[in-house]
Amino acid sequence: MKSIPIRRFAAALALVGGAVTTVSAQDVTGAGATFPAPLYARWAADYNKATGIRINYQSVGSGAGLRQIRGKTVDFGASDMPLTDEELAKDGLTQFPTAIGGVVPVLNVAGIQTRQLRLTGPVLADIYLGKIGKWNDPAIAGLNPGVKLPDAPIAVVRRADGSGTTFIFTNYLSKVSPDWKSKVGEGTAVNWPTGAGGKGNEGVSAFVQRLPNSIGYVEYAYAKQNKMPYALMQNAAGAFVAPDDASFKAAAAGADWSKTFFQILTNQPGKDSWPITGATFIMMHLKQDKPAQAAASLRFFDWAFKNGDKVADELDYVPMPDSVKATIRQQWAKIVDAAGGPVLR
């Protein structure tokens, strides 16, 4: 597996978009989720080399991405929290998935290596509720016989910004913990009972790396590229599994994308499924004020669907199946200009 430091993802984004001051008619702007930012940065850099067109993607979190696309300040928004069909219709938007990945609990506990610690959903929820406050709590120790757990307070790290990663994480906790569901619930932003906040997957990764005895949650690419220890999770079938593209793919196996793109992939059945799996989505307006920009955006994602699967695999995302890509391309015909004609011809 090819290793690419996270700082190079940020540099790629700046090179492809952020450092550019003049934008041509074909250049594209987007903003939103940090979950797929490593993937979008690589796709954008490769697309720029192939076509000369720049993709200026701002990794600002799903909440900000949704606000910007609703406000028409970007050509596309990105979110890991899909909108319902009713929400899309109300806002005049359409959405489509681009890739599938996983959210993982990352650790900074002396002596505990990656995949050494086992957690269940209810225990993870109780840590984030503040009910489990020490690493050697019996609830954790009982899952991990033989693992030396420190008698130290757990330093909880969570997102400080509106986040699709947070939506996936809190949606999962709401499914496995009635206490979490009733007290906190799910969303891109919630009233956290405890913990310190980091901005973006990048911020949470950095916070956990420098804070002893901490736990956080990030998209898997950030954990892997930063060489951060992560926990095994018990899934709905009762098996303890590791995050990787195979377990993300297993979790997505039952999704019926032909009916709707509103698909939630957390806590799915199957012994191989990673329980905190999610897709990431692009949102665009159905009726375009700037059809040339919309067409340029769609050409970028069409190119990525044709040429970007290898990069997705390298970064441990799961590419969308070809059948789903075909359904997505059919939906693009609904994105039209002021005269009602499709922007992508």
Image (cartoon, rainbow, N blue to C red):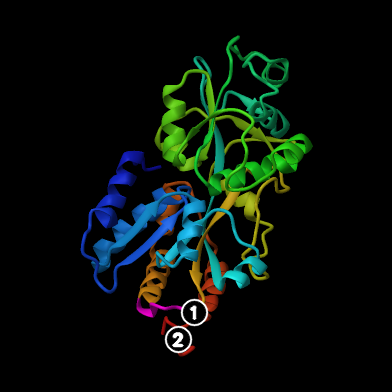
Regarding residue 27, the answer to whether it shows in the image is yes
The first of marks 1 and 2 along the sequence is 1
Where residue 321 appears, as percent x and y from the top left, is 55, 63
Regarding residue 275, the answer to whether it shows in the image is no
Label 2: element kind: loop
The dot on residue 343 is none
Name above or below for residue 134 compared with residue 330: above
Part of the protein shown in magenta: 288-292
Question: Does the magenta segment cover residue 290?
Answer: yes
Amino acid type at circle 1 is Lys
Q: How many marks?
A: 2
The residue under label 2 is 338
| Image quadrant where one finds the C terminus | bottom left
Q: Residues within 10 Å of mark 2 (few under 14, many from 20)?
A: few
Left or right? Give the position of 77 relative to 190: left
Question: Does the magenta segment cover residue 195?
Answer: no
Name above or below for residue 304 compared with residue 290: above
| Image quadrant where one finds the N terminus | top left
Marks 2 and 1: in contact by CB < 8 Å? yes
Where residue 104 appears, as percent x and y from the top left, is 56, 37
Question: For the stretch drawn in magenta, what is the main secondary structure?
Answer: loop
Name above or below for residue 168 compared with residue 327: above
Left or right? Give the position of 128 relative to 309: right
Label 1: element kind: loop
Question: Residue, x 69% and y 57% (percent of image)?
Answer: 254
Where residue 175 appears, as percent x and y from the top left, is 74, 43
- Choose top left, top right, bottom left or bottom right for residue 177: top right
Question: Residue, x 55% and y 71% (percent of image)?
Answer: 94
Name above or below for residue 228 compared with residue 186: above
Amino acid type at circle 2 is Ala
The residue under label 1 is 287
Question: Residue, x 44% and y 58% (percent of image)?
Answer: 309
